[in-house]
Amino acid sequence: MRYPAPEDRRPLARIRRALIEVAFIVFLFYSNLLMGEFTRANGQGKTLAFALRDILTVTNFSIAMVAALIGYVVFEYLRKKL
């Protein structure tokens, strides 16, 4: 089995790092929404399933992806600048 040369693996590593960073930002966004959901509307009978159904929407996912991509671009710029 042939392994790719180190210079061939570099673009794949960049893509993996970008996906991990974007996924982490999306995770932070959703965890913040979930915490806010429980503190804002902490009523009787409020369950995790209800809160998840309330925050897992197409609109929230779109906002999370846009914010994550902007965050990734900003951090890459700062990483190269510093």
Image (spheres, grey):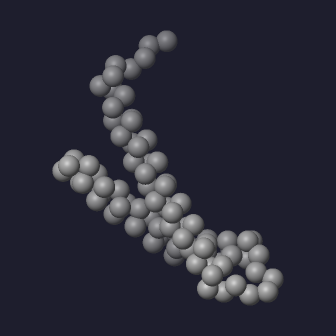
Where is residue 22? Give x, y as percent.
44, 55
Which residue corresponds to the image point at 33% horizontal and 35% vertical from the top-left? 11
Q: Residue furthest top?
A: 1
Q: Nearer the viewer, residue 34 or 49?
A: 34
Q: State left or right for residue 44 relative to residue 66.
A: right
Where is residue 55? Give x, y as percent.
61, 75
Where is residue 35? Give x, y as percent.
60, 73
Where is residue 17? Give x, y as percent.
41, 43
Residue 14 position by quadrant: top left
Which residue corresponds to the image point at 51% horizontal and 76% vertical from the top-left? 59
Q: Is residue 28 above or below residue 56?
A: above
Which residue corresponds to the image point at 39% horizontal and 48% vertical from the top-left? 18
Query: How many numbered circles does the render carry?
Result: 0
Which residue corresponds to the image point at 33% horizontal and 22% vertical from the top-left? 6
Q: Residue furthest right?
A: 45
Residue 54 position by quadrant: bottom right
Q: Is residue 29 above or below residue 19?
A: below
Q: State left or right for residue 71 relative to residue 22.
A: left
